[in-house]
Image: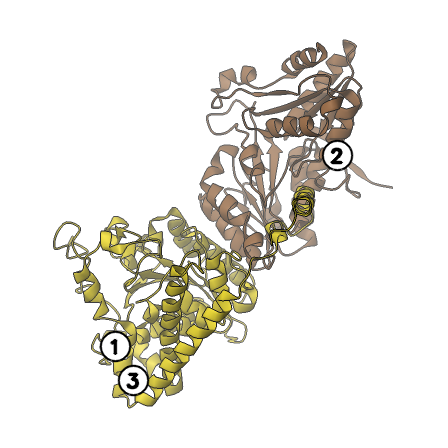
């Protein structure tokens, strides 16, 4: 078997094997073209409006500006941690736009772009990273479920949810108001977890309406993707009966088309599918990480040349979109950054009783006892103010 | 007038699940071999036939997957009842139970409820091979967000499983597998008490003997023998291991001045350790003797030919009774 990666030296740059078939509609230089074997995905792009294309660009730029600001806020001590998604905007915004209005999304913890496309308040993510709460948005309202920090844990929840959708008879009825599917995001690192194998299996044997969406950003903290797998990840589902497709993760149109096509299919009852978006984590794993210790600048440069936002901008300019639009987007981004800075500074410390709230849905004597104890203790010791 | 029916614990659990499934179409039952076979202990016998493949189904042999998908089903509005085939097989699901199931209500600030029931046949004395006789309840009782119960008789089994299914919180039901075929009357009309209450099983004046699950029968035997010897032992069935009904325990210990906690699990960092500490904290001046823990030894569960010695019996409990009375 041919090596999965062209490894130039031991622990040298991780550059993907470009001979593996991959859905790409926008080449790195911004040229649009539909290879004939991918015609069904091209048809989806044919029906996309210019307004939607511009909205996608706005969201990609918006989430990158948000990300840059969040890194700054962490450096200033305003956030406990930040998890940058810079470089993954094509995979996240593209796939987020491909998810239907009734569908449910089960993310990992780096899906800020997907969150943006589904109405999650960006401040909710900052609150969590500041340590004000552990999530705190309503997953039933947004259909974007809570961030999952234990890798792959959320993927089984997604499969269970999809099984429930099927039990409810909300698959393949042809009623587009009612039918829905589920998508779960995870990374190349998470694929090593047993919960991914169990998820693929449970989804396959139940023919659940789910799309597994891997963002293969090449690194799991400091571990190269070939630490997690010896075969391309889009083939990971085959042994379970889950077909796969590799997508150029930095091509927003390919991600949109593939997600939309396969979510529609899942909703119609085709069963599970696995998408691998080949992308790159330009930044660190988190603000606690130092990628210069484990990867070469040469590799980062390779990927920077394939930046999803730059690529899409080139495409849009060729479509006749001019500076007025891009200037407006930049101004809006700076306004967003100023706004989240101000809101983050204003976030206080949550009430101490939040330690005890919602441990259980129903009454619990031990929680009540300890809550009362803390209240009395605080009163005895005096205020911290 | 309540109607009563005599049945064993396994059958009472079966009838309780059946009733819950009849009452609420959102209740599902799944796990390994629970469908046509009815589970290796036949606790789910007949349910697949009555409720069909969409509500009672066999899962792949993947415990993490069982609990993880149960969580997703609960998010979708179902009330999944899951079976872990044996106590020693729960550990592949430990992550999903402790980091996800137990925390999702807290993580979501109450937006998500987690009405998931995990049934686990547990404990020894059935002559089984390794990993089939364990008592892992302390691992779960240590985890906030879970509720843990263990019925000791058919009436409690019938009602506690239904109360567990009705709870909006995750409940682990540890089922005393060696007592599955022990019969008793089940009141089909009226629940005996709330899910998390302890029950005074036998009044006594000299020693409080606390037990749960399979050890309740053993504790009652010990009290009977004690009575013959002129020792008055009060027996309390804890029923709930998280939360624990401390008011009932403390009222008894304040009366008798002595306490023994008995279970099959190893005593090191166990339910009995915690209960002993709480009694010391809240009933110190009422105690005539230290609280004694009677349990399995701090070893792996031994081969079956040694389990009779490993597991506490009435004699081991009475030896502890002699010790507390000696103070």
Write down which chain is painted yellow: A
**Same chain shared by disc 2 and disc 1:** no
Q: Residue at x 29, y 78 (%)?
A: A312
According to the picture, the residue beneath numbered tag 2 turns out to be B247
Write down which chain is painted brown: B
Relative to A44, is B74 on the left or the right? right
Q: State the image coordinates of residue B126 (x, y, percent, origin top left).
A: 55, 24
Residue A172 visible in the displayed image: no
Relative to A162, is A93 on the left or the right? left
Please state which of residues A251 and A381 is positioned toward the viewer in this rendering. Answer: A381
According to the picture, the residue beneath numbered tag 1 turns out to be A26
Relative to B203, is B245 on the left or the right? left
**What secondary structure is marked by label 2?**
helix
Are the two marked residues, 3 and 2, in contact with CB atoms closer than 8 angstroms? no
**Same chain shared by disc 3 and disc 1:** yes
Q: Earlier in the sequence, mark 3 or mark 1?
A: 1
According to the picture, the residue beneath numbered tag 3 turns out to be A316
């Amino acid at each position: 078997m041919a090596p999965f990666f062209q490894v130039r030296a031991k622990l040298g740059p991780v550059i993907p094997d470009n001979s593996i078939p991959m859905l790409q509609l926008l080449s790195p230089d911004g040229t649009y073209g539909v290879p004939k074997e991918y015609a069904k995905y091209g048809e989806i792009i044919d029906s996309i409006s210019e307004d939607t294309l511009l909205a996608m660009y706005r969201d990609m730029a918006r989430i990158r500006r948000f990300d840059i600001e969040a890194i700054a806020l962490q450096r200033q001590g305003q956030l406990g941690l930040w998890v940058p998604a810079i470089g993954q905007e094509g995979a996240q915004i593209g796939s987020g736009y491909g998810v239907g209005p009734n569908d449910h999304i089960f993310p990992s913890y780096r899906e800020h772009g997907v969150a943006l496309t589904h109405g999650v308040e960006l401040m909710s993510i900052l609150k969590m990273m500041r340590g004000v709460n552990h999530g705190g948005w309503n997953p039933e309202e947004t259909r974007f479920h809570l961030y999952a920090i234990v890798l792959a844990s959320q993927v089984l929840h997604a499969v269970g949810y999809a099984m429930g959708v099927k039990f409810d008879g909300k698959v393949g009825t042809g009623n587009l108001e009612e039918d829905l599917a589920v998508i779960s995001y995870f990374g190349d690192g998470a694929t090593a977890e047993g919960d991914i194998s169990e998820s693929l299996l449970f989804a396959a044997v139940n023919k659940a309406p789910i799309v597994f969406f891997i963002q293969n950003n090449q690194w799991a903290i400091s571990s190269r993707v070939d630490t997690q797998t010896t075969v391309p990840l889009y083939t990971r589902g085959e042994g379970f009966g889950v077909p796969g497709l590799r997508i150029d993760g930095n091509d927003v149109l390919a991600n949109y088309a593939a997600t939309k096509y396969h979510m529609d299919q899942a909703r119609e009852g085709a069963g599970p599918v696995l998408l691998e978006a080949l992308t790159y984590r330009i930044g660190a794993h988190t603000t606690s990480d130092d990628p210069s210790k484990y990867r070469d600048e040469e590799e980062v440069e390779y990927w920077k040349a394939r930046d999803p936002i730059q690529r899409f901008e080139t495409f849009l300019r060729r479509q006749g979109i001019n500076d007025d639009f891009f200037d407006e987007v930049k101004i809006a981004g700076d306004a967003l950054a100023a706004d989240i800075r101000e809101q983050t500074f204003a976030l206080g410390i949550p009430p101490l009783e939040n330690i005890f709230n919602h441990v259980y849905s129903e009454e619990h004597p031990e929680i009540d006892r300890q809550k009362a104890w803390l209240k009395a203790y605080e009163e005895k010791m005096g205020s911290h103010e | 007038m309540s109607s009563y029916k005599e049945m064993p614990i396994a059958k009472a659990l079966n009838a309780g699940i059946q009733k819950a499934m009849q009452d609420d179409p959102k209740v599902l039952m799944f796990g390994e071999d629970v469908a046509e076979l009815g589970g290796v202990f036949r606790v789910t016998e007949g349910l697949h036939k009555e409720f069909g493949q969409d509500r009672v189904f066999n899962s792949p042999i993947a415990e993490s997957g069982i609990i993880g998908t149960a969580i997703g089903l609960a998010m979708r509005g179902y009330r999944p009842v899951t079976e872990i085939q044996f106590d020693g097989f729960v550990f592949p699901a430990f992550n999903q139970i402790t980091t996800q199931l137990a925390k999702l209500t807290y993580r979501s600030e109450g937006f998500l409820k987690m009405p998931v029931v995990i049934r686990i046949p547990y404990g020894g004395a059935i002559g089984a091979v390794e990993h089939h006789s364990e008592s892992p309840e302390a691992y779960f009782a240590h985890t906030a967000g879970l509720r843990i119960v263990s019925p000791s008789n058919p009436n409690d089994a019938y009602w506690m499983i239904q109360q567990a299914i009705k709870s909006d919180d995750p409940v682990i039901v540890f089922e005393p597998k060696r007592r599955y075929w022990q019969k008793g009357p089940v009141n089909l009309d009226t629940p005996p008490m709330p899910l998390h209450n302890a029950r005074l099983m036998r009044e006594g004046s000299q020693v409080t003997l606390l037990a749960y699950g399979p050890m309740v029968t053993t504790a009652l035997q010990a009290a009977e023998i004690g009575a013959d010897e002129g020792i008055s032992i009060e027996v309390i069935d804890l029923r709930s291991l998280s939360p624990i009904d401390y008011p009932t325990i403390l009222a008894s210990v304040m009366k008798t001045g002595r306490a023994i906690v008995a279970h099959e699990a190893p005593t090191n960092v166990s339910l009995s350790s915690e209960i002993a500490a709480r009694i010391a904290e809240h009933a110190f001046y009422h105690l005539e003797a230290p609280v004694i823990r009677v349990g399995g030894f701090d070893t792996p569960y031994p081969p079956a030919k040694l389990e009779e010695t490993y597991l506490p019996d009435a004699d081991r409990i009475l030896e502890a009774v002699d010790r507390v009375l000696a103070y």
